[in-house]
Each structure stands twice: as structure tokens, then as C-alpha cells.
């Protein structure tokens, strides 16, 4: 069997984590399949050294379009590829072999109103729907995303296989004490802090998180443990998101909210492991990997009660209404002050993380590959 796997987004946030862990797990568990990794030299370098059954098929990150699809289809045909897998929602419709697509969420289309959408949005929707309908198999990272795919795109239920994500293998849930001290000193982060990690798109609901934090900060201004509480946000740069700067100024929390931008996995592990609590009040998630990662590091988690988050986090998180700032602030306060609740959630969090593994996920992905290759052969 010959499988081609798109790695052109391996360095992106979210999708890149999934792609990297997928390839690394395939390399550990499957020595018989021949893999072509479609991408650039720099993409392959992000994956490190791989076994001999993995080869790079150099292909640039051209804009989606007719010429791009024709070139890709020809390259896959020349190498007699049996299965083509894009680990993200891509509009690729010309390949002759079975196409597997991993869908992490349908956020770009969740609020799309056909009677009021821009023409470009409608064209993107119909192009994506056409690609999904032509795909041999769709891998959904949660049952919630599977339901969204069925509802929004009219896809048959038996075409969609739910294969969960798991915690990033590069994270270390137990960083060494000297690494912790060095990292916290480098970032001057010795005060207790509430942590958020992830991208900072509007659906992540960070302006409400900042406002809720400001309320908690005021309530605990004289508390012996939390009077110097900070909010640390790890993700995109603040300069790219001026609405967050406005939210901080409006909440009068300029001296207590810190944006660290993107950090490497080793640094992220330190911040997870030392967080007083982890807050993730997202308005929509296809899976919700950061709160699961926080649980793996022993941080008590607050999360939204919407989309895939209750499915993934189970009974190991404190849930709030993400559209209610006062509910978010009450949740944060409870998570910080209720020692019994904290201990309970940390214990449940460790157990919840054990339900997800890249070994099991890749086993199921391989089953889908083999079924697709068998269907093509027959």
C-alpha cells in the first residue's frame, strides 16, 4: 500500500499538532506501508528523522485552484498512490485515488447564512461540500463535529468515522524542577496565574475571558494567595489582534494580563504544570485539545458547556456558559478557591486523558487506509 499524506500545514497551530503526531505515530507503528509526505523541505524538517518507508514528495503551498489540483493529481498518479490523506479540510477534488479528509471542526461554516453571506463565502462552502461528498472517507475528531458535518453539508452518516485526537507527544507532563524555575524566571512569571493556550480567533471568546478575569481579580484583591493573580494567554501575537488590546484596556487589567505569543512545547508544558487553573471558554470547538493537555499536566480546567468540549472532557472540567461573563467569573473563582473541587477535577482530569491515545487513533486510521486501498483495488 502506498499512502500520500499532506504535511504542508505541519507547522501551523492545531492542525500542525495533529499532523505531526499522526506522522510520528505512523512511523512508530507501521513499517510496511510506503508513505509520501507531500510538502516542502522545511515541513519535513519539522518532523525530524523518519524511517525509510517515509519519503518527501516536494510540493509547494500553492493557492487552492485548478492548476494546483492538476499538478497534485499528476504527481500522485505518477507514483501510483493508493490513498491520499489531507489531515485538514481541503478542497482537493481531482485526485484519482481514494481521498481521506480529516475534519477538525466546521467553524468557518457554522454561522454562514446562505441568504446573507458574501459570494466568496458561498463559493467556498459549495466547493468544500463538493470535495467532502467526493471524498472516499471523512475522519471526524469528535461526534459533535460529525453531527455538524451531517447537518451543514448533508453528508451520509456512514461516510464519517470518528477518530479522536490525543495529547501532543512532545509535551512533558512532568517537567524537571530546574526547567520550571528557569522558564518561569525567563518570563518573570512567579505570581499565580490563570492560563489560556490556543489560537486567539473570535470564537475563542477571549474578550469575555479577560472581562471575567478582571472581575475575579477585583474580588480577590485582598486574598493572601491570589492578590497578585495574572492572566497569561499563550497563542498568536497581540499585535495581530487589536480587539484583545481594547478588551484589556476596557477591563482596566493592563498590568495583569500577559500575551506570550507562540511558545515551544517544552515551555508550554511548564506553564500548564504551574497554572493555578486553565480557562477555555470557547464558543465552538471541534475537539478541544488544549484543556485536555492542561489536564495531563495536573491543572484544574474550566471550559464551555458547548460543542465538543463536554464530549471530550467528560466529568473532569467545570463547565460554564461561554456567553455569560458573570458565569465565567464565578467558575474561575470556584476553581481557584474550592480546594476540594480542585483536587477532584485534577484526579478526574488524569483519568480522562488516559481515554485518548495516538496509538489507538492511528490504528483506526490505518484501518481506514486499508479499506480505502482495498476498495480502489477491487
Image (cartoon, rainbow, N blue to C red):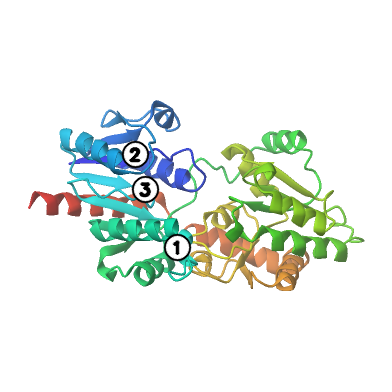
Of tags 3 and 2, the one toward the viewer is 3
Residue 51, how many percent across, how many down? Answer: 31, 30
Calculate the distance from the C-alpha at mark 3 to the C-alpha at mark 2.
18 Å
Calculate the distance from the C-alpha at mark 3 to the C-alpha at mark 1.
18 Å
Disc 3 element: loop
Of tags 1 and 2, the one toward the viewer is 1
Q: Which residue is mark 1?
A: 109
**Which residue occupies 28% across, 59% down?**
130
Disc 1 element: helix
Residue 101, how many percent across, how many down? Answer: 32, 53
Q: Nearer the viewer, residue 275 or 116?
A: 116
State which tag comes first along the sequence, 1 or 2.
2
* Mark 2 surroundings: few (<14), some (14-19) or many (≥20) residues within 10 A: few
Q: Which residue is mark 3?
A: 87
Calculate the distance from the C-alpha at mark 1 to the C-alpha at mark 2.
36 Å
Residue 28 is marked as: 2
Amino acid at each position: 500500500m502506498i499512502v500520500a499524506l499532506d504535511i504542508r500545514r505541519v507547522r501551523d497551530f492545531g492542525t500542525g499538532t495533529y499532523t505531526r503526531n499522526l506522522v510520528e505515530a505512523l512511523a512508530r507503528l507501521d513499517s510496511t506501508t510506503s508513505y509520501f509526505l507531500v510538502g516542502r523541505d522545511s515541513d519535513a524538517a519539522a518532523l525530524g528523522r523518519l524511517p525509510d518507508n517515509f519519503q518527501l514528495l516536494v510540493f509547494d503551498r500553492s493557492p487552492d485552484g485548478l492548476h494546483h489540483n492538476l499538478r497534485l493529481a499528476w504527481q500522485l498518479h505518477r507514483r501510483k498512490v493508493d490513498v491520499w490523506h489531507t489531515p485538514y479540510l481541503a478542497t482537493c477534488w481531482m485526485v484519482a485515488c481514494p481521498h481521506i479528509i480529516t475534519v477538525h471542526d466546521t467553524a468557518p461554516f457554522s454561522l454562514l447564512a446562505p441568504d446573507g453571506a458574501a459570494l466568496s463565502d458561498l463559493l467556498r462552502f459549495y466547493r468544500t461540500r463538493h470535495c467532502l461528498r467526493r471524498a472516499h472517507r471523512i475522519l471526524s475528531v469528535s461526534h459533535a463535529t460529525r453531527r455538524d458535518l451531517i447537518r451543514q453539508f448533508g453528508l451520509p452518516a456512514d461516510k464519517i468515522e470518528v477518530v479522536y485526537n490525543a495529547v501532543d507527544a512532545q509535551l512533558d507532563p512532568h517537567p524537571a524542577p530546574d526547567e520550571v524555575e528557569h522558564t518561569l524566571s525567563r518570563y518573570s512569571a512567579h505570581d499565580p496565574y490563570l492560563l489560556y493556550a490556543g489560537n486567539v480567533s473570535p470564537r475563542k471568546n477571549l474578550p469575555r475571558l479577560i472581562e471575567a478575569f478582571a472581575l475575579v481579580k477585583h474580588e480577590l484583591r485582598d486574598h493572601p494567595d491570589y492578590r497578585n493573580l495574572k492572566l497569561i494567554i499563550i497563542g498568536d501575537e497581540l499585535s495581530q489582534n487589536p480587539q484583545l488590546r481594547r478588551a484589556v484596556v476596557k477591563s482596566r487589567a493592563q498590568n495583569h494580563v500577559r500575551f506570550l505569543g507562540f511558545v515551544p512545547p517544552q515551555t508550554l508544558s511548564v506553564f500548564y504544570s504551574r497554572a493555578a487553573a486553565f480557562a477555555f471558554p470557547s464558543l465552538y470547538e471541534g475537539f478541544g485539545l488544549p484543556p485536555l493537555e492542561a489536564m495531563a499536566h495536573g491543572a484544574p480546567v474550566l471550559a464551555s458547556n458547548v460543542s465538543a468540549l463536554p464530549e471530550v472532557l467528560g466529568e473532569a472540567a467545570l463547565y460554564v456558559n461561554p456567553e455569560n461573563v458573570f458565569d465565567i467569573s464565578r467558575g474561575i473563582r470556584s476553581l481557584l478557591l474550592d480546594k476540594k473541587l480542585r483536587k477532584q477535577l485534577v484526579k478526574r482530569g488524569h483519568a480522562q486523558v488516559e481515554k485518548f491515545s495516538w496509538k489507538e487513533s492511528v490504528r483506526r486510521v490505518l484501518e481506514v487506509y486499508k479499506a480505502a486501498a482495498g476498495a480502489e483495488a477491487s
